[in-house]
Amino acid sequence: MAPDPQTSTPFRARRLVVAGLVAAVVAAGIAVPLALRGGDDREGRPAAKAAGVTGVTGVAAHPDQSPPRQLIAAGSVAVSTYYTTKLVKRPDGNAVGTYEWWLLDTATGRYAKTDWAWVDVAPGMRTAAVLERDLPVERIGLVDLATGKVRRWIDVGGGADGGVGGGVGGVRFSPDGKRLLATAYRLNPDGLFKDASYELNDRTVPGPKQSRAGFYVIDVASGKAAFAERPAGKTEPGVPVGGRQDFQWSRDGKRVWAPADNKSGRVFYDGTGKEVPAPEQEADPYDPGVARSPDGKLETGAFVGEGDEIVSEVRRVKDGERAAVVPGQQLLAWADDRHLIAWRCDPERCDPGKGEFRNQLLLVGLDGSTAPLSGFRSQTLRDDSRWTPVFTRR
């Protein structure tokens, strides 16, 4: 199964030991369609407002829904899509970890289940990049969020058995939405193979294989793709390392990076695959889960609760010092310069080992104010209904 956002952040570990899926949530963007402004839930009544939190525009909250059926949003961000994961066993002794995606229909303000293997939504929330099942694949679809229909396909060729760089196993929009970064693989990056088995909790289980070939940088308007060969690094014998090793965009979208065993935990490349120095703002040890406020002055920090406290810190970017402590186990995204969206478990049932994973999306202010945005997730980590939101700027 995929690492739960509450317990681990993808790429935080330098060795990605995986018994399933590894994914990174990337949020970026600008203005949402006017149809969604104001938080209308499209069922004849307004979405719930953020009681207890003031000064936030465009709030759409549904604290009675988990997983959500209708739009969840606050300020400049919205849940554009979310996914669940499950392990599917194959008759040959292999298995595959699969993502199941629910994508926002901007015409209705509701989430609809899809059959895509991978989804990423562009800033502006008008277009999604999608991949078909049975990764890796030879083409990327561009879906209109207002209709759910594929507007066009971008062919990269390859698939699992041919082409210059193999097929595509993961894809992400650049921060400006004008390019796609597609990671190429020779095998399904979420596959688990009998001939790569290892011991886990006194059981022999199928393991992942590294087959990353490199990445494509694709111009969305023209569909022109350039391939850079960058296979995954070698691994230690007997250490199962995740098959999914997707490339990510740098914050400014001028470079790409992949996880590595160095000081920063990443190695950066230009669009041709040449290794380059890290951008200044990302040169120090860095967690890809860190999110910066829209004005660039603050960034999310770690959980700092003690005893019964369920709080996390917010830091100043200029000096790394603590600027505030706010409610929440994990800070996910900024609604505006003074408010964030966080996971938090129910304070009445947040006992370690019991209810600590029964959490909900919460809108929190730097002043400590809170308001629920979603219902609670199951407290059972391996429950297939546990959903992971993807935030996109609108």
Image (cartoon, helix red, strand yellow):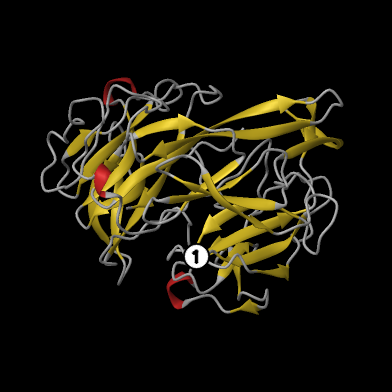
User: How many marks on residues?
Assistant: 1
**Would residue 303 be seen by someone viewing this image from the given angle?**
no
**Would residue 66 be seen by someone viewing this image from the given angle?**
yes
Q: Quick check: 164 above or below 188? A: below
* Rendered location of residue 42, percent (x, y): 26, 30
Q: Quick check: 211 above or below 363? A: below
* Front-most of residues 346 and 85: 85
* Rendered location of residue 73, percent (x, y): 28, 41
* Rendered location of residue 367, percent (x, y): 14, 48
Say left or right for 332 vs 268: left
Indicate the quadrant where residue 270 lies.
bottom right
Q: Residue at x 43, y 20 (%)?
A: 354
Amino acid type at circle 1 is: Pro
Say left or right for 94 vs 137: right
Q: Residue at x 75, y 44 (%)?
A: 188
Dot 1, how many residues are within 10 Å of its Cα: few (below 14), some (14-19), or many (20+)? few
* Rendered location of residue 324, percent (x, y): 22, 53
- Assign the N terminus to one quadrant of the image: top right
Residue named by callout 1: 285
Give the secondary structure at mark 1. loop
Say left or right for 90 vs 2: right
Indicate the quadrant where residue 257 lies.
bottom right
Q: Residue at x 48, y 57 (%)?
A: 287
